[in-house]
Image (cartoon, rainbow, N blue to C red):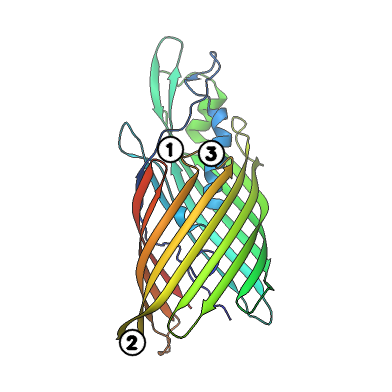
Amino acid sequence: MRKPFLSPSRSRIFPALAFLLAAAPGFAQAQAAPDRAVVGTNVKNYANAVLAIMSYTAVPDVTTSSLSINSGTSGNPGFGQTQLGGGFTLSRSFPLYLEGTLAYSRYDPTFIATDGNQERPVPAKWNTASTTIGIGWDFPITDELRLRPILNGMIGRVASDLRVAQTVFNHVADANLQFLEDGALNAYGVGGSLMLDLEHYREHYEIDLELRATDIYIRSFGGSSAAVQGSAAAQQFSLWARWRAPTGLAALDRPVRYVLETAYSHYFGDSAGVLGFNDLTSLGVGLELDSSRYPVIVTRTRAMVRYVFGHNVHGVSFGLAVSF
């Protein structure tokens, strides 16, 4: 029986405590209509982009589980996200697969507001929370290799917490500014994944390998502000691999294992390029303690350090995971 981890779909780590510092090009700006109070970019044109950003949290993925994109001008994070998730198969006799993730992200775009005579920057803060669940079934190909189709569903919300206060454009009645002041965008997603899962376990080493293709369609619904209605497609292909073996040391009456890990994610559709890159690669190393000899709920604890890189982005992350 596969024991659940605090990790995405299977026993790989999803950092609960992780940091990734990176740099990337800014988001492309769409030209606003000249009669809008917000110029330089139209808030409504960002609806699809915001949902495309949400698509990064819709899929369990070690490369984007903790991500911070710094502004090239200010050096401050203009985008950041953290994701925590887990997944497991109930048993070989009843191979129902379940997964779930919780994610939070923050996006800080800057708009320009005008009353016709003066222009002022409007720094906004958009906070996104989302959750994704998945239900699948394992079809054995061999004793170690399984094909796993998964049905995915997600729900999320984007809220703007800008307070325009007593600026020159307060009196302008515009749907874009109304959203910036106190607006919200609700979104849902439906789609699926196809995974190929290899578990090659031997006495002196363990190998896990997974290939995953995911396609989730996301769109706004319900109480979303009128200024922001949109849709996006989360399309992604990922490869993840891990090697575990004893170090020769012992702790808690069990061998201490070293862990080597690599992951690669390529983004298609609306996810491609929205943060300035189309793919990310992660290389990780860590240690794992085995506490299964003792009557505690946590059987294994694993700490990882990862180097993550892609086009114009790179950084280091730190992760912690446990199994039960």
Measure the alpha-carbon separation of dots 3 and 2. 47 Å
Task: Identify the residue shown where x is 60% and y is 43%.
Answer: 186
Measure the alpha-carbon separation of dots 2 and 1. 46 Å
Residues tagged 2 and 1 counted as in contact (Cβ below 8 A): no
Which residue is nearer to you in this view: 306 or 122?
306
Q: Nearer the viewer, mark 2 or mark 1?
A: 2
Q: How many marks?
A: 3
**Helix, strand, or loop for circle 3?**
helix
Q: Nearer the viewer, mark 3 or mark 1?
A: 3
Residue 247 appears anywhere in the view: yes
Which residue is nearer to you in this view: 288 or 79?
288
Q: Which residue is mark 3?
A: 50
Residue 94: quadrant of the picture: bottom right
Q: Which residue is mark 1?
A: 125
Residue 115: quadrant of the picture: top left
Eyeballing the image, is 20 above or below 288? above
Please tell me which of labels 3 and 1 falls first in the chain: 3
**Helix, strand, or loop for circle 1?**
loop
Check the picture and name the quadrant holding the N terminus: bottom right
Q: Measured from the top left, where is residue 46 in percent x and y? A: 54, 32
Measure the alpha-carbon separation of dots 3 and 1. 12 Å
Q: Residues within 10 Å of mark 3 (few under 14, many from 20)?
A: many
Residue 165 appears anywhere in the view: no
Please tell me which of labels 3 and 2 falls first in the chain: 3
Q: Which residue is mark 2?
A: 252
**Horizontal placement of 66 versus 186: left or right?**
left
Give the residue type that dot 2 points to: Leu
**Horizontal placement of 23 versus 156: left or right?**
left
**Helix, strand, or loop for circle 2?**
loop
Eyeballing the image, is 115 above or below 57? above
